[in-house]
């Protein structure tokens, strides 16, 4: 750096004419950077009069906030324009930093101290060695790296990454797409939507009241618990810990028709097709696409896809996803050592696939064991569907190596406590004989059929379903054949 003019003054105005950067070069001081809409074409530094207090220095196309030694107790304030503020870069070795309403790019290295950011809408790239961080009412790109400390993000819409070595992360009312990387600590996500990807070495993940969220969580050692709310996609995995989810699993939005009628091609469609674009507009919505790009607008909302990035705005709010996110409409939970408990809404069609070894499975959705049964400790596979007459259904995959699996049907809003068991209905005579070949049925036993005055025995719908699942367990039919036969049974009487 060129030689610095040591002239000091109590207040240092600075013109932004010819300035492309604002650079911080401070050793030890607290600093506030506040955007003021009344400030135009200049920055203003309010500081103390000691030699150790910050000062403004012009160097080429940059204004430098320069400070050496330990600053006085007076906290300097750098006022910048709300519009037209140059990018802010540089470093502060020690001290607290406060940013308010800054809409420009900020790229700062901070050794030790606390960081607070309020109401900013620019691109924030920040590296903090040790200290606590709080972001509130922020909009824009985020790349935050902290060695040790607690991080809180509240009432913000962000897209980016947050990496923390050791500490706790709290996201409260956060929308957008955010990737959380934490070495050791706790992650708490509250009242949030969008897509959040969590990668945690050691600690628990607590998700409370998600709002149509697409949630991905990979944990080395710790529990994953999701309480109430709703999810549009879920991919949960822990090496050692339990997984509990009683959020409502939402069906994916229906997609508009993929192509228009060639016989009724409009002039707009022909023009766009000549430019290499596929165009369709009908009562189901509008779709424009070309080579990895898709724009769809219809009753399901607005959906934009480019490469591995997807943006969807619909009845469930905003969702962002990339190739790392859980697929919308697909839900999975896996633990090497631990239990899995998932609550499902009654009446929501779902296909359940469960794999476990050395544990027990209890499911309110009828399941059948498929594949060859092995010795104790070998992985067993169970499959089953609820509401088999539905053409669309959720896909739920569960797996545990050492633990139990519990799938519960709840009649109303999901609850974390298990439902009290219902007393079994006494069977009506005569007793239905057991099938000659044994099968493994997991779930609620079917209700015996009502006695009717007839000379020809008629199988009830539940008996037909059991017969199909028995045939599947014996390997006489495939899973696809079983799905087709279950769908042919039609809806239950009265539904």
Image (cartoon, helix red, strand yellow):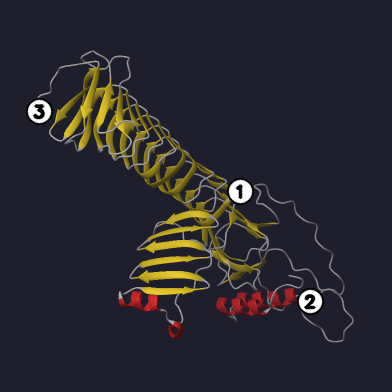
Q: Is residue 104 left or right of residue 263?
A: left
User: What secondary structure is found at the residue carrying circle 3?
Assistant: loop
Of badges 1 and 3, the one in the foreground is: 3
Dot 2 corresponds to which residue?
433
Q: Which mark is residue 89?
A: none
Residue at 28% over, 18% down: 47
- Nearer the observer, 100 or 72: 100
- Nearer the observer, 367 or 284: 284
Q: Is residue 423 visible?
A: yes
Dot 1 corresponds to which residue?
228
Q: How many marks?
A: 3
Q: Is residue 146 left or right of residue 49?
A: right
Q: Relative to residue 96, is residue 249 depicted above or below?
A: below
Q: Is residue 478 visible?
A: no
Residue at 61% over, 48% down: 228
- The earlier-in-sequence mark between 2 and 1 is 1
Q: Position of residue 266 (x, y in %)?
A: 42, 79
User: What secondary structure is found at the residue carrying circle 1?
Assistant: loop
Q: Which mark is residue 2?
A: 3
Q: Position of residue 400 (x, y in %)?
A: 53, 56
- The earlier-in-sequence mark between 2 and 3 is 3
- Asked if disc 2 and disc 1 are in contact, CB closer than 8 Å, the reply is no
Quadrant that contains the N terminus:
top left
- Nearer the observer, 268 or 425: 268
* Residue ranking furthest to the right: 453
What whole-number distance in Å separates the C-alpha atoms at marks 2 and 1? 42 Å
- Occupied quadrant, residue 402: bottom right
């Amino acid at each position: 750096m060129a030689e610095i003019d040591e002239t000091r003054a109590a207040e240092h105005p600075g013109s932004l004419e010819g300035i492309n950067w604002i650079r911080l070069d401070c050793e030890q001081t607290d600093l506030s950077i506040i955007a003021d809409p009344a400030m135009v074409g200049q920055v203003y530094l309010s500081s103390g009069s000691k030699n150790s207090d910050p000062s403004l220095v012009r160097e080429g196309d940059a204004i430098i906030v320069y400070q050496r030694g330990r600053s006085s107790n007076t906290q300097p304030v750098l006022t910048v324009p709300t519009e037209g503020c140059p990018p802010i870069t540089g470093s502060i070795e020690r001290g607290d930093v406060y940013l308010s309403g800054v809409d420009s790019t900020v790229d700062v290295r901070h050794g030790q101290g606390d960081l607070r950011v309020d109401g900013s809408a620019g691109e924030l790239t920040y590296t903090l060695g040790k200290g606590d961080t709080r972001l509130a009412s922020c909009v824009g790109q985020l790349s935050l790296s902290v060695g040790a400390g607690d991080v809180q993000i509240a009432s913000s819409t962000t897209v980016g990454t947050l990496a923390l070595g050791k500490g706790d992360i709290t996201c409260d009312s956060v929308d957008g797409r955010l990737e959380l990387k934490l070495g050791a600590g706790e992650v708490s996500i509250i009242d949030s939507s969008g897509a959040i990807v969590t990668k945690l070495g050691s600690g628990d993940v607590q998700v409370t009241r998600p709002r149509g969220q697409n949630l991905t969580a990979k944990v080395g050692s710790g529990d994953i618990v999701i309480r109430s709310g709703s999810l549009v996609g879920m991919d949960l995995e822990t090496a050692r810990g339990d997984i509990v989810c009683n959020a409502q699993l939402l069906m994916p939005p229906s997609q508009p028709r993929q192509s228009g009628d060639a016989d009724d091609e409009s002039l707009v469609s022909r023009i766009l097709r000549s430019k290499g674009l596929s165009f369709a507009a009908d009562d189901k919505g509008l779709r424009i696409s070309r080579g990895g790009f898709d724009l769809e607008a219809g009753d399901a909302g607005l959906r934009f896809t480019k490469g591995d990035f997807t943006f969807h705005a619909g009845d469930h709010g905003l969702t962002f996803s990339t190739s790392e996110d859980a697929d919308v409409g697909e839900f999975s939970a896996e633990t090497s050592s631990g239990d899995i408990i998932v609550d499902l809404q009654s009446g929501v069609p779902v296909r359940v696939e469960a794999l476990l070894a050395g544990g027990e499975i209890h499911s309110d959705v009828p399941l059948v064991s498929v594949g060859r049964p092995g010795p104790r400790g070998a992985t067993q596979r169970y499959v089953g569907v609820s509401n088999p007459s539905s053409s669309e259904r959720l896909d739920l995959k569960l797996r545990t190596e050492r633990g139990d699996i519990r799938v519960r049907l709840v009649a109303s809003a999901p609850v974390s406590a298990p439902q009290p068991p219902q007393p079994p209905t006494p069977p009506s005579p005569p007793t239905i004989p057991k099938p000659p070949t044994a099968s493994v049925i997991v779930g609620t036993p079917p209700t015996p059929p009502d006695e009717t005055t007839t000379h020809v025995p008629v199988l009830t719908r539940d008996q037909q379903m059991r017969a199909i699942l028995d045939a599947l367990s014996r390997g006489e039919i495939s899973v696809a054949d079983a799905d087709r036969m279950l769908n042919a049974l039609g809806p239950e009487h009265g539904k």
